[in-house]
Image (cartoon, rainbow, N blue to C red):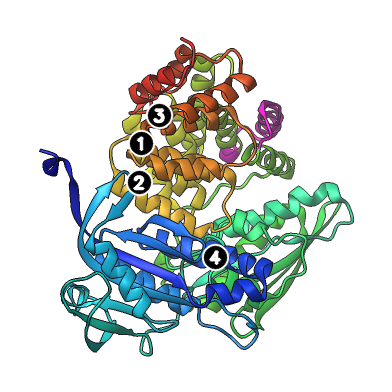
């Protein structure tokens, strides 16, 4: 009977080990540890995530990773070794040996055992520094399915393995090198990839910073409408704000071919905008222009900058590739000014007060120009962000206000992706799933590169029972926004938890940032589902320290639209949240 309870599965195992770890530590312990941390953060973790691997064990000098696909395992190993290729500046380079096997393993909790694992470890020990050795089984399953070639190294007797094993070396010589990683970026650039760095505020008034930032964001948005462009999202571009930048380094870190830089000087009703397009690979300027216009002409300037960028970097793009959808710009620039100030507050609120102040700016923009769709859309967002991330008062009122504002935005401009995003999210939090999916998909059809909308789509699609679309949207968002804001981790965690992947969800929640009531709640739920009850109770204790009035009844009322609401409630009950 005991044998029947043993769980087994066929899986691909990758074993990786640092070459000369003891020697490196002896020579420079602190420096080696720092380089290893950077290697894991910038290369191993992003590549493993890219190829859908699961880290089974992470040791000081190596890792054991499981893949559902042996093709993914080999591709991941090749990408890692290419990323790790040393350059002349590396005095103490980090190098890995990697072994891969496809075999039957025994599952015990999150760990794996058996010959399938042991063979991968022995292959890794056999491998030369910087190389990948695989078993004959791997070659049988992968040959013809990738561009990777293999060199037969004959049969070997491996320690603690009864039978001789056919060993092959992956030929890295003919494999195209991968782009160096930055943080979460796991995508080599292509010729139509671009990042727009924050335009510098040259007005001499720090209070005008929101205006130059707004111009930058609008240029990013307009570029994102081109399906053939790969556009890095605002948060990742803005990570370089205020720092002296080497465009070649920025291009490598963000994985893009082109960089846009510029400046904005505003004086009264006059504005000067400069913009330049730089080839980050070659380091040379492709195009530059200066615009001196009336403030009311700023939208024409944005359109001209966008057009010139596209003409210069993607001359083969068809005119049809640019969506005919075009935002309806306000005629009165005072409305646009208030909208920009609202967007700054609502996109990154520190609390309810920021949402309320942002809403006031939206309302002032609407007073000036009642037909300004984006102002109505962001007013709706001020409610949905509160409902998703904060504790609010009258939930029914917030649901109604969000819907009314978003519906008005779509009515005013049915071709604006931000308005459809606002209505999709408002409908979701109001318990209207079909309507939510309809409008969030419309938003992505109008602007397929918008990373924020992709993240929202990921948790909405997961909640509505489409995990494949959900995970694809999440990965696309992370690719387009490698330096992502903390709310992405909330959305990613909710997506993964909805799919029952609580261990991965917990990692996302852990990256959210400062103490937050909703994150304590979500951590507690994940920990209960992982069988870690005492840790879950500690999270509920932290939640109650921030929100002493929190109860299961309040959670049920707010989380009613989530498909796993019953799991959430039962988990929190077990973790000790009062009724």
**Residue located beneath label 2 in the image:** 470
N-term-proximal mark, 1 vs 2: 2
**Residue located beneath label 3 in the image:** 528
N-term-proximal mark, 1 vs 3: 1
Say left or right for 579 vs 346: left
Query: In this orientation, does residue 391 appear?
Result: no
What label does residue 498 carry, if any? 1
Q: Are marks 3 and 2 in contact (CB under 8 Å)?
A: no
N-term-proximal mark, 3 vs 4: 4
SS of the residue under disc 2: helix
Q: CA distance from mark 4 to mark 1?
A: 28 Å
Marks 3, 2: nearer the viewer: 3
Say left or right for 451 vs 248: left
Marks 1, 3: nearer the viewer: 3
Which stretch is magenta? 349-374
Asked if 485 appears above or below 482 in the picture, the reply is: above
Asked if 156 appears above or below 202 in the picture, the reply is: below
SS of the residue under disc 3: helix
User: Nearest the camera: 234 or 324?
Assistant: 234
Q: Are marks 1 and 3 in contact (CB under 8 Å)?
A: no
- Indicate the position of residue 330 as horizontal and vertical percent values: 64, 44
In which image quadrant can residue 433 be found? top left
User: Nearest the camera: 139 or 490?
Assistant: 139
Query: In this orientation, does residue 446 appear?
Result: yes
Marks 2, 4: nearer the viewer: 4
């Amino acid at each position: 009977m005991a044998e029947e309870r043993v769980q087994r599965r066929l899986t691909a195992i990758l074993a990786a080990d640092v070459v000369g770890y003891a020697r490196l530590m002896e020579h420079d312990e602190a420096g080696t540890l720092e380089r290893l941390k950077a290697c894991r953060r910038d290369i191993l973790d992003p590549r493993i995530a890219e190829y859908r691997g699961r880290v089974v064990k992470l040791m000081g000098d190596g890792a054991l990773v499981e893949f559902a696909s042996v093709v993914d395992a080999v591709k991941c190993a090749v990408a890692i070794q290419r990323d790790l290729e040393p350059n002349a500046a590396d005095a103490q380079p980090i190098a890995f040996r990697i072994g891969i096997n496809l075999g039957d393993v025994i599952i015990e909790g999150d760990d794996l055992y058996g010959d399938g694992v042991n063979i991968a470890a022995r292959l890794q020990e056999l491998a030369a520094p910087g190389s990948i050795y695989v078993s004959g089984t791997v070659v049988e399953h992968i040959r013809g399915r990738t561009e990777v070639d293999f060199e037969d190294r004959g049969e070997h007797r491996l320690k603690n393995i009864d039978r001789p094993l056919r060993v092959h070396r992956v030929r890295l010589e003919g494999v195209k090198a991968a782009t160096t990683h930055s943080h979460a970026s796991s995508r080599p650039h292509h010729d139509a990839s671009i990042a727009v760095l924050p335009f510098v505020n040259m007005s001499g008034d720090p209070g005008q910073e929101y205006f130059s930032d707004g111009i930058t964001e609008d240029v990013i948005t307009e570029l994102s409408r081109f399906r053939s462009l790969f556009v890095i999202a605002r948060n990742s571009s803005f990570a370089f704000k205020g720092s002296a930048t080497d465009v070649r380094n920025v291009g490598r870190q963000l994985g893009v071919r082109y960089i846009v830089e510029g400046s904005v000087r505003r004086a009264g009703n006059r504005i000067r905008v400069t913009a330049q397009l730089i080839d980050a690979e070659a380091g040379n300027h492709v195009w530059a222009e200066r615009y001196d216009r009336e403030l009311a002409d700023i939208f024409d300037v944005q359109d001209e900058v966008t057009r010139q960028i596209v003409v210069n970097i993607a001359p083969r793009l068809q005119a049809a590739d640019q969506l005919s959808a075009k935002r309806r710009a306000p005629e009165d620039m005072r409305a646009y000014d208030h909208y920009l100030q609202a967007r700054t507050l609502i996109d990154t609120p520190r609390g309810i007060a920021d949402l309320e102040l942002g809403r006031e700016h939206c309302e002032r923009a609407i007073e000036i120009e009642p037909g300004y769709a984006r102002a109505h859309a962001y007013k709706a967002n001020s409610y949905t962000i509160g409902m998703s991330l904060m504790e609010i008062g009258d939930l029914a009122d917030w649901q109604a206000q969000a819907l009314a504002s978003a519906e008005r935005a779509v009515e005013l401009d049915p071709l604006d992706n931000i308005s459809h995003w606002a209505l999709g999210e408002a409908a979701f939090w109001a318990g209207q799933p079909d309507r939510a999916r309809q409008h969030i998909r419309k938003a992505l059809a109008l602007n397929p590169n918008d990373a924020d909308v992709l993240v929202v789509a990921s948790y909405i699609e997961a909640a509505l029972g489409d995990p494949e679309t959900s995970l694809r949207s999440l990965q696309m968002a992370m690719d387009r926004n490698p330096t992502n804001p903390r709310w992405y981790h909330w959305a990613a965690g909710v997506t993964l938890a909805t799919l029952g992947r609580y261990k991965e969800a917990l990692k996302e929640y852990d990256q959210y940032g400062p103490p937050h009531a909703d994150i304590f709640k979500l951590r507690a739920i994940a920990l209960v589902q992982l069988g870690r009850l005492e840790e879950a109770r500690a999270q509920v204790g932290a939640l109650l320290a921030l929100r002493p009035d929190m109860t299961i009844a309040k959670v049920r009322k707010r989380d009613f639209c989530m498909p796993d609401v019953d799991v959430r409630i039962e988990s929190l009950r077990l973790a000790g949240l009062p009724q």
